[in-house]
Image (cartoon, grey):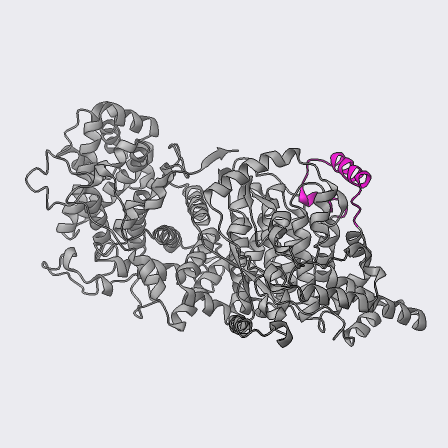
Amino acid sequence: MGAGESKLGTAFTPGNLGNLDLTKEIWEQLELDAINSIQDVFSLLPSPEIRKLKEEHAANIRTLCQKLVEQLVLSVEASCRTQADQKSVLNSCRILTRLLPFLYEDPEWRLFFWAQDSADHRRDEDSDPVLAQTLIMAVTDLLFCPDFTVSSENKGRDEVDDLENLESCELIWEKGVGFVMTPTQVPQHHQNRCELLRLLLTCFSQTIYLPPQGEAHLAGDRWVKLFTSPINRHALPLFTSLLNTVISYEPSGGLLPYNHLIWADSKEKLTELCLQVLIVTLDQNPPVHLEQDHSARTKSSPVISENLFINYLSRIHRDEDFELILTGITRLLMNPLHHTYLPHSQRKVYFHQELLILFWKLCEHNKRFLFFVLKSSDVLDLLVPILHNLTDARADQSRIGLMHIGVFILLLLSGERNFGVRLNKPFTLTVPLDIPVFSGSHADLLIIVFHKIITNGHHRLQPLFECLLTILCNVSPYIKSMSMVASCKLIHLIEAFSTPWFLLANSTNHNLIYFLLEVLNNIIQYQFDGNSNLIYTIIRKRAVFHNLANLATDGGAIARAVAKKKKKPKMKRSDSQTDEPMEGSNPALPAEPGTLKTSLIKFPGIGSLTEAKSAHPSQKQLENLTKSLEALGLDPLASHLAPGVELETAGGLQEPSGASSNLEEKTAGRIEMQGLGEKCTGGATQIQPDSQQNTGHLLDHNLEDLEKAVTNCEAQPKASTSKRMLSRQTSKESTKARSSSVADENWTPSTEWINSWKNKLPLHTVMRLLQVLVPQVEKMCIDKGLTDESEIITFLQHGTLVGLLPVPHPILIRRYQSNPGTAMWFRTYMWGVIYLRTIDPPVWHSTNIKLFQVQKV
């Protein structure tokens, strides 16, 4: 770059900037060829010099920012027709992108863009917009500038054709949702859009310089609110352009192999930036009336009351648009999984975390999109890459956030019946999954992957165990035929989690058994006919259930179990499987050296994430009918409505008299989501109440005794029943849970504590099944001399337990419920992903981030 670089480098030093005439000389230098990329700006303005300039020459850096914004405005007024104007625009954006993060570090500098300067705006204070609004409006105008960021339909532009009067709805970047034309694509225009979008993303990043516990996040980011408000006349074409750019991107770029090595792909970086800007704007949804900072409360400050991006997203309703969105997202998620005969012959993209966040936002703000996804088998095209990412990330502690968002998307989907039904479709894809070979359905794939995560993941995944099992509980009533591999994995989890040393390791481990037994009960009660493999595995592993039912509660047994626990290494739920590593498994590894890790805020417990609802569509009618019968003095139990009335009790059966008052107190456990103890009184402890009988002696009863026990349990007075909905946890409860988690380290099990949950284990259905089928199978094996399990499975396929099992319980679905805690977690995770992905240039590196902690490994 020669003399130009020398002159520019000298001008940008703090000492010279302090005396530089910013009214003229800076623009001459911005138009030089010395700055050709944003990397040049980062090399000329290192972070120590920017901080020194901010401290020693604050007035000059204010003037510099004003002049940079002013240059953007002048270029808009001149319609950015010349190469010099375009060069000035790009370099102004690059310098602002470099400076803004260092201004956001200081709370006083954050107000600079939102307050009028009394010296410059004394006469027109009531009319001039704040600097932030001027900057945003200029950038949005430039994003639809013909021959700069979009292609001009006309060969020559009229002189009167200025940017402020252009109809931007005709200049949307890509064909797709709401736009049927195919615009001309120019690589240079893609690069210019990237510079402007990077500046917008930098403007929106003020959030990461605020601590997560502060109340500033409740009001939302003012930059985002301004950008998505009606003040922005380009809001609709911008939203459409960003969305269509993402869903229309084809990484392969054609059928020619290795074409990405020959031709540069100008759309990959553009797609990534569009995706990041889109998810950031969809993260903000402030209420209509918000108190603004007193310092920013000026007459000319815009009053923002609506997020138009969320409004537009929620109003998408056509199936063809939903199909475009879903196809685009799944195509990009599946891209890293595609394998060809020629290695590395196709371009791979890796912004799957941002895509998962976008999918989450789509489901959150547009329920019709969620229903569209679930009503067809296309949801399985999304399931496979999510499960691939979960298995791939389970051993890397730096990817804990990816594990969380993948699991909670599955939790959201599993709350709908259609998802469980679709899982019965056979799994035939060939994708690189680190799991045993099996032949079965997508439900088998789900179970095998979850087993892999639990048994071979690192210890930081422990808080996700209850979420994983909740998903299995939600889909279990619809699994028609489970493969032998999946059946063994499921029973293997019960065997591992029911060992005495594990159950007594802490006060919450027994909750996992509740979930697993509920899975078995749902399958046995509702899908017995097609699940002979699971029934055979239960019979073969019947000792597991016998041992669980006869769990010793005396002091000596407790002491032996605790002593065995102390001999183990540091308590990990996954340690229960260290004796038998699974097929194809790899040991959990720490984060790779040289990578960056961002620590996220603690995720709320499962109890604050879900709400229990009955899966039966007519239950409200049954409940209303029961109330009307009670009003008439009739016994609702005589109408056989008892199982239906108890829609939202644990398991659907009524508790014995007096049990409802202390059921939550006895069984409500604490879950730790990355160290945060959350007391949950619902999803984590929804159990099927047992009868007064001790389950340890169930095998000694005959069928008549068991039928009487179940009948007595059902016929208890209605006064003891209550609906235990899973409620969101308040901050006060969370604080108490955190303090109790510390006390749990010194917790020791007792006989009373074991009996409080052991006597309520939902073992009735499994024990009844074993009592009926085990003698039949043993007799058949002895009479026919069978040694082949296939003949036993064939016998079980033709068997039935109609009239022999307990009364079927209503299907209980735990649906995700949004709350402020999860919203804050997703915001932190989103910005953590953007921070780690923004390496070239490193926009926010070397700045004081407060939203999360950055660790260099």
Left or right, 49 with reference to 768: left
Please state, as top left, top right, bottom left or bottom right, where the N terminus lies in the image: top left
Query: Image quarter for residue 208?
Result: top left
Query: Residue sitting at 47 percent across and 65 percent down?
Result: 255
Which of the two residues, 543 or 198, is positioned nearer the viewer here? Answer: 543
Q: Residue furthest front?
A: 633
The answer to whether residue 190 is visible is yes
Q: Quadrant of residue 629?
A: bottom right
From the viewer's side, name the closer residue of 743 and 310. Answer: 743
Residue 480 on image: x %, y %:
66, 71
Q: Is residue 227 above or below residue 131?
A: below
Q: Give x and y (percent) for residue 115.
A: 19, 38
User: What residue appears at the point 77 percent right and 52 percent down from the top-left corner?
Assistant: 548
Q: Is residue 481 visible?
A: no
* Of 370 and 353, the residue lying toward us: 370
The overriding secondary structure of the stretch rendered in magenta is helix
Q: Is residue 201 left or right of residue 368?
A: left
Of all residues shown, which one is farthest toward the left? 123
Left/right placement of residue 323 relative to residue 680 reads left
Q: What are the residue bounds of the magenta stretch? A: 551-580
| Residue 638 position (above or below residue 436) | below
Is 80 placed left or right of 633 in the picture?
A: left
Is residue 569 part of the magenta span, yes or no?
yes
Q: How many marks?
A: 0
Vertical position of residue 373 compared to residue 650: above or below: below
Q: Position of residue 773 (x, y in %)?
A: 82, 68
Q: Position of residue 64 (x, y in %)?
A: 20, 34
Q: Is residue 378 magenta?
A: no
Locate residue 241: give its quadrant.
Answer: bottom left
